[in-house]
Amino acid sequence: MKLLLSILLWINFLAAPELSAIRKMYADVSKSETNAKEFLDKLAGVSATDDNVLVAYKAASILLDSKFEDKLRNKMERFKEGAKLLESTVKNEPNNIEIRMIRLSIQENVPGITGYKKNIKEDRAFITAHYGEQNTTLKEYLKNFVLQSKSFSDKEKQFVK
């Protein structure tokens, strides 16, 4: 009986993280290296075969963590790894608004030298067009993102109010 309980606890521990907790963490992840590392650790168990939204957050965690690498080569390798993973989630679910928001949040904050800014207009237009179709929880989350986003003008932000 103890063995069964132990196994169940381990399975629960290793299970994919709760999306609501990930969303909460994501809002503050770029504020410090500690936050970025904690976010990366929280998503360590997520694999490419898990839910695409969680995989997109994992990709974002790799991208955000890459800026804290000491060596330029390591920074570039981690960045490419994260970008490739994020693009694969968009390819797998091109109509997922949360994945588009994650990509937009990354692309609007990376340096131009990375060349990873090509989808900002596309993602902004997608979010604007499909915001009204989302459930209340996701709408609130998207609203918070849009209101602080650099990619939306004050006039464009009116659609979430």
Image (cartoon, rainbow, N blue to C red):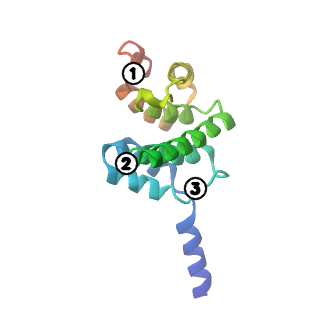
The kind of residue tagged 3 is Val
Question: What residue is shown with label 3?
Answer: 46
Residue 38 x %, y %? 39, 56
Residue closer to the observer: 97 or 74: 74
Give the residue at x 37% y 24%. 150
Give the residue at x 51% y 30%. 116
Describe residue 21's horizontal placement relative to residue 122 as left or right: left
Where disc 2 sits, the SS reads loop
The kind of residue tagged 2 is Phe
Label 2 packing within 10 angstroms: few (<14), some (14-19), many (20+): some
Q: Is residue 66 visible?
A: yes
3 vs 2, front mark: 2
Where disc 1 sits, the SS reads loop
* Picture disc at residue 139: none
Question: What residue is shown with label 2?
Answer: 68
Describe residue 146's horizontal placement relative to residue 2 as left or right: left
Q: Can residue 23 be seen in this view?
A: no
Whichever of callouts 1 and 3 sits on the residue coming sooner in the sequence is: 3
The kind of residue tagged 1 is Lys
Farthest residue, direction left: 32
Question: What residue is shown with label 1?
Answer: 161
